[in-house]
């Protein structure tokens, strides 16, 4: 495991490197996070494990991959495929998101649905109103460098064909959550315009303090290219232990863990991203699934949208031009109505009803 603690001999060797090793490592990280990644082939792999929740008794794995390219003053271009595996047993949902900067699409059941042009223009206008370089993470309120506390160099490792320096250390949870808050506040309009879903509400200071207080052993790993000092992989791991007195308020959840890896390949290459040759209006999908059903599926994929109980009953009409028939949509809608909002496994089983 790349997140495991260093072996004792390695730690002793690192400790003997001299008093300026920490300064050298921090300098390496400072340099790496100032080198921009304008484009790359992205790979994300995350695993979530929750203890004490029967509906989440198996790990949930989220994988995403595809090229992206930053655009000045508008949405980045991206063609990202997303797969969510809720504990195996065939319960895998595959979807995707594609953007050309001026157009945005959602992929569902191998069909692309286009977000209304007016919404995309609204998203781009929100980006343009922000000061500074629209491609900069800092312009979005995100500064990953601040998330990284004390660190040590762990040697060299090859990442996707590139020789890198491996650095690991402690993750600053409060800094991370504070940045996510700033991201939500600054990017709410762009999130809604690109996805058709409302942005989540920012966390309050008390919420951040409470979350940070139950996180255990937050760690990170960064792999920096030796030739260009550019980040090639970021990984992290954290555990959560919920105090016994608070467990009843969170459905009996005792704790859990999150591991993630974000890898960049072919950095600053000529990534080619084009709009699909055929796409239907997003309204076709919302009419077919119903607004509540679509949000229910999104929540099952981790969007945090409102559940089926608070939305209008989903329509049972199938989309034009083929796809799952009316009976399948009716079964899917009925399944969503019976599923609990926080039961990810049940939501994934519902989605399987639409598989051809």
Image: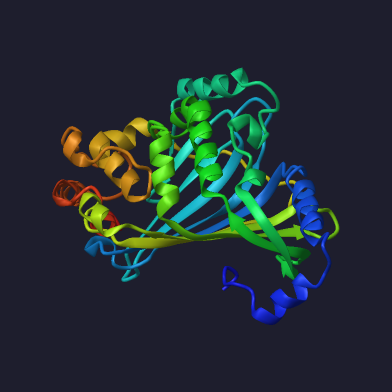
**Residue ID at (34%, 61%):** 255
**Percent x, y of residue 196:** 40, 31
- Residue at the image position 60 percent from the left and 47 percent from the top: 147
Please tell me which residue is depicted at 49% across the width and 42% down the height of the picture: 177
Q: Is residue 70 left or right of residue 319?
A: right
Colour treatment of the image:
rainbow
Task: Check the picture and name the quadrant holding the C terminus.
Answer: bottom left
Query: Does 60 sit left or right of 154 as displayed?
Result: left
Identify the image quadrant of the N terminus: bottom right
Q: Residue furthest right?
A: 227
Query: Between residues 135 and 246, which one lies in front from this camera angle?
Result: 246
- The image shows residue 13 at horizontal and vertical percentages of 77, 76
Q: Is residue 104 left or right of residue 139?
A: left
Residue 355 seen in the figure: yes
Q: Which residue is drawn at the image coordinates 43% and 29% (left, top)?
A: 192
**Along the line of sight, the residue nearer the viewer: 70 or 201:** 201
Tell me where residue 3 appears, x and y as whole percent: 57, 68
């Amino acid at each position: 495991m790349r997140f495991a603690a260093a072996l004792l001999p390695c730690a002793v060797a690192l400790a003997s490197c001299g008093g300026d090793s920490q300064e050298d490592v921090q300098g390496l990280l400072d340099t790496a996070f100032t080198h921009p990644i304008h484009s790359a082939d992205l790979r994300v792999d995350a695993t979530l494990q929750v203890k004490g929740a029967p509906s989440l008794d198996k790990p949930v794995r989220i994988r995403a991959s595809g090229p992206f390219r930053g655009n000045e003053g508008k949405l980045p271009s991206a063609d990202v495929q997303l797969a969510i595996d809720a504990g195996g047993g065939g319960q895998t949902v595959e979807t995707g998101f594609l953007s050309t900067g001026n157009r945005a699409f959602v992929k569902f059941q191998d069909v692309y649905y286009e977000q209304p042009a007016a919404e995309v223009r609204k998203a781009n206008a929100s980006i343009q109103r922000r000061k500074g370089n629209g491609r900069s993470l800092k312009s979005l309120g995100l500064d990953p460098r601040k998330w990284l506390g004390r660190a040590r160099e762990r040697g060299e490792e090859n990442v996707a064909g590139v020789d890198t320096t491996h650095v690991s250390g402690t993750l600053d949870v409060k800094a991370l959550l504070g940045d996510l808050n700033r991201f939500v506040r600054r990017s709410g309009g762009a999130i809604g315009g690109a996805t058709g879903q409302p942005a989540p509400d920012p966390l309050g200071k008390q919420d951040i303090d409470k979350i940070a207080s139950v996180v255990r052993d937050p760690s990170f790993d960064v792999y920096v290219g030796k030739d260009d000092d550019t980040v090639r992989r970021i990984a992290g791991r954290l555990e959560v232990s919920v105090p016994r007195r608070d467990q009843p308020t969170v459905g009996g959840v005792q704790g859990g863990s999150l591991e993630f890896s974000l890898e960049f390949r072919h950095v600053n290459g000529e990534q080619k991203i084009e709009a699909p040759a055929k796409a239907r209006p997003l309204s076709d999908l919302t009419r077919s699934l119903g607004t509540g059903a679509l949000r229910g599926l999104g929540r099952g994929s981790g969007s945090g949208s409102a559940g089926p109980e608070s939305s209008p009953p989903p329509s049972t009409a199938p989309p034009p031009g083929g796809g799952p028939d009316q009976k399948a949509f009716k079964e899917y809608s009925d399944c969503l109505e019976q599923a609990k909002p926080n039961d990810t496994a049940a939501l994934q089983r519902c989605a399987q009803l639409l598989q051809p």
